Amino acid sequence: GKFIQIKSDVKPDTASFQVGGGSTALLSSYGLSVQITPTSATNRILVFGQVCIHRENDGLMAILITKDGSGLSGAIGDTSGNRQRVTSGGFADASTVLETVPFSAVVAAGGTSLQEYSIKIMHDSGSERTMYLNRGREDTPDNQYRYRGISAMTVMEIEP
């Protein structure tokens, strides 16, 4: 297909925030989101990028691509019992490890009004946990093993 427009957002700095057990945090609140107005409802939208995350205490983390704050249909796994439907995930297993979680999806534009794409982050704990964006849980002392990453999202409108 033909590329109609490309929009992107990059978050090179760090952030930390609380996510309750069974809750999610929307990264547009921390500076990672892309707005696009499709030129045709029949065009396709390609969403891709990566999120560098870590969490308090070891455990599972997952992300969900969102459109206007809700999970993006066509960018999440199938249903099965009470399992969470997510786009992608990872595991935090050391205090300095930075988990890079990639994501991608191609979906129908579905309309020609302004659309906002972002990412929701969640974890597997039943309790509130601190989540870290673009850094590991331990960020001191200042040395070569305390990595800093970059999170980015690109949204492209494609004519079929």
Image: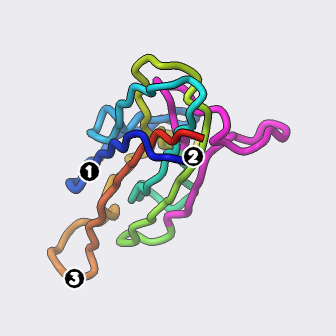
Circle on res. 133: none
Q: CA distance from mark 2 to mark 3?
A: 30 Å
Which residue appears at 48% of the width and 51% of the height? Answer: 48
Residue 77 or 114: which is nearer the viewer? Answer: 114
Q: CA distance from mark 1 to mark 3?
A: 21 Å
Q: Which region shows up in magenta?
A: 64-92
- Quick check: 75 above or below 89? above
**Could you tell whether 140 is left or right of 74 in the image?**
left
The answer to whether residue 7 is magenta is: no
Disc 1: which residue: 11
Which residue appears at 33% of the width and 42% of the height? Answer: 7
Dot 3 amino acid type:
Gln
Disc 2: which residue: 125
Mark 3 crowdedness (10 Å alpha carbons): few <14, some 14-19, many ≥20: few
Instruction: Name which quarter of the figure residue 51 lies in.
Output: bottom left
In this rendering, which labeled residue sits more in front, label 1 or label 3? 1
Residue 49 or 2: which is nearer the viewer? Answer: 2
Q: Position of residue 74 (x, y in %)?
A: 67, 38
Dot 2 amino acid type:
Ser
In this rendering, which labeled residue sits more in front, label 2 or label 1? 1
| Secondary element at image label 1 | strand
Can you say which quadrant of the picture contains the C terminus?
top right
- Quick check: 104 above or below 138? above
Residue 126 or 122: which is nearer the viewer? Answer: 122
Q: CA distance from mark 2 to mark 1?
A: 26 Å
**Could you tell whether 27 is left or right of 127 in the image?**
left
Here the colouring is rainbow
Label 2 vs 1, first from the N-terminus: 1
Disc 3: which residue: 144
